[in-house]
Every structure is written in structure tokens, then in C-alpha cells.
Amino acid sequence: MRFLPAALLLAICLMFATALLRKQESITAAVNITHIEKSLPAFTLADLDGGSAESSELKGPALINLFASWCMPCIIEYGILDDISRTHNVPVYGIAYKDNAIALQRHKRENALPYSRILMDNDGVAMLALGAKAVPETFVMDAKGTLVLHITGALTPDDVTSTIAPLLEKLKQ
Amino acid sequence: MKMLTLWLLSCLLLAAPVQADSTRASELYRQLRCITCQSQSVADSNAPLAQDIRRMVDEEIKHGKTDEEILSLLASRYGDAILMTPPLTTETAPLWYGPLTFLVIGLLLLFSHFRNSSGRGVS
């Protein structure tokens, strides 16, 4: 009875520590990188170059990057995405969140965008289907159309070296 | 007069389901957390993502989904964190039972302290 309060306190501390450590297993590096395994959800978006596109038209292995012309961190990661695309020979599909065609076309002329295709998600349909919260966010998709990595925040060269590059090489094998 | 009564009646009958859907949607907004805001529900937030979630909830209601289906659909995408009342799981157990456990520990400590004090007072 004398040590019961202390034992209970210790048990609670252990419970919190276990919960915290379990969460940290899937999160690494400066941005949040989470290993996932879910199919690319079905959605239909307008293509910046005209017409519409089904999500099933996006073929992996590829990167799907949620961005916006008004988003500064997105502009910073264009160079990194372009490097990934060239080095690993994978397409990067851009999904523009809450943007408009005129602003995007201007943005495309003014910046070297790394995207092989740009889809427009004005109503957040893809954002919600993918379970994304903000821009920039990036998903890595394998050849079967399964999303295997979810990166929130702007990519850094360290994230590419430590996680994305090895994963893409593995997916291409 | 008859025609007017019929017209009013049909207006009321048509408006009733819309009103019910709107009430259901508002209740669901209150049960969902705005995940890009601090301590706000989707009902209270004007964040772009909260607006998107409200639109999605409206559409799912129109498609005949139940409240549970809509909530579990969003939880499958964003995790239980999107629910204002997270379900009781091993991960959320500390949130549910933590305060009560600390209260019990506090009471036990108080009880043991007063018992020791009174014991010393008697001797």
C-alpha cells in the first residue's frame, strides 16, 4: 500500500513513454516521413493542359506532389523534385491545391516546374482522398499504384539521400 | 385557397429533408476536428481544409452515407485525431484514463499523508 502511488505513477509514465516511442518509429528526418501502404484513391481532376484526368492514369513508380503557385516552400522544393525525377527516371505528378489555371500557367512560365503533368484540385477532392493536410506534401507510389511513402512539408536533400532515393531504387527493381 | 394550401404543403414536404440533412451535416461538422487549426472543430473553422471537409460531408450525406460511415471514412484517411471524441483504443487509453488515474494517485497520496500525520499525532 505504501508504494502503490509510486508504482501507479511509474506505470503511467511507462504507458506514455511506450505510446510516444511507438509513434516515433514511423517518423524520421526534418520533414515528417511516414511509411504507408494504401492504394491510390480514385479521383477525377481537371488537367492544366485541358480536359480531365482520372487518378488511375497516374502510373508508378512516381512521385505525387501537392503544391500551389502561392506556396513558397513548394517553390523551394521544385529543384529537389526535378533532381529526383531526372536521377531516378520517375515522373512527378503535380496536384495544384486551391489554385487557378491563369495563375498556374504564369507560374509555369516563370519557374522550371518539375511536373510531367499538372492536375488542379480546387475543391480539395484529391487532398481529402489522399489524407493530406496542407501543401507541400509528397507521396511515393509504386508500380502497382500503392502509395508507400507520405512526406509532409518541403523536402530536403537529406530526406532524398536517406529515404526517397533508396526507396525509388528498390521500387524500380 | 385550396391551391395555396396544397402549394404550402408541398413546399413544407420538400423543405423537410433538406432541413434534416442540414442539421445532420452541422452535427457532423461539430464532431470533426479541424486538423490544421488549434482546438477548433470543422464547424468553427474557416481554414481551407475545413471548408473542403464540410463540402465532402454534404456530398456524402447526399449520397446516402450514414454518420458512422462518413466519420469512419475521414478517420481512415486522417486517423482518429480528426474525431473530436477519439475512440477508446490502446493508443488513446492514456487520454481517457490518465486524468482519472492521476486523481486516484493524488487522493491516495493525500490519504497516506494524512494517515501518517494522524499516526504521529497520536504517538
Image: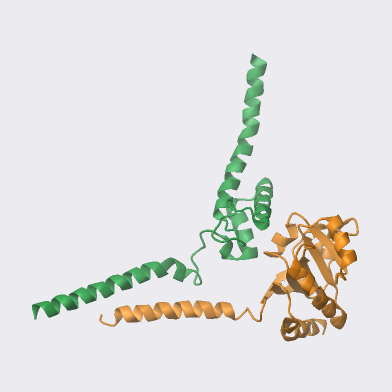
Q: Which chain is orange?
A: A
Q: Residue at x 64, y 15 (%)?
A: B2
A19 up-or-down from A69: above or below: below
Which colour scheme appears in the figure? by chain
In the image, residue A60 lies at what x, y percent?
Answer: 82, 73
Chain identifier of the green chain? B
Total number of numbered discs in the rendering: 0
* Snapshot quadrant of residue B33: bottom right
Q: Where residue A28 sits in the image (x, y, percent)?
A: 64, 81
Determine the image quadrant of residue B112. Answer: bottom left
**Residue B30 location, x and y as percent?**
55, 52
Q: Quadrant of the N terminus of chain B?
A: top right
Q: State whether residue A40 appears in this view.
A: no
In the image, taking residue A116 as reference, residue B93 lies left or right, namely left
Of residues B27 and A100, the one drawn nearer to the viewer in this rendering:
A100
Measuring 66% from the left and 54% from the top, which residue is drawn there?
Answer: B53
Is A103 positioned to the left or the right of A167 in the image?
right
Q: What residue is at 47 percent from the left and 77 percent from the top?
A: A16
Screen quadrant of the C terminus of chain B: bottom left
User: Quick check: B117 left or right of A100?
Assistant: left
Indicate the position of residue A91 as horizontal and vertical percent values: 85, 73
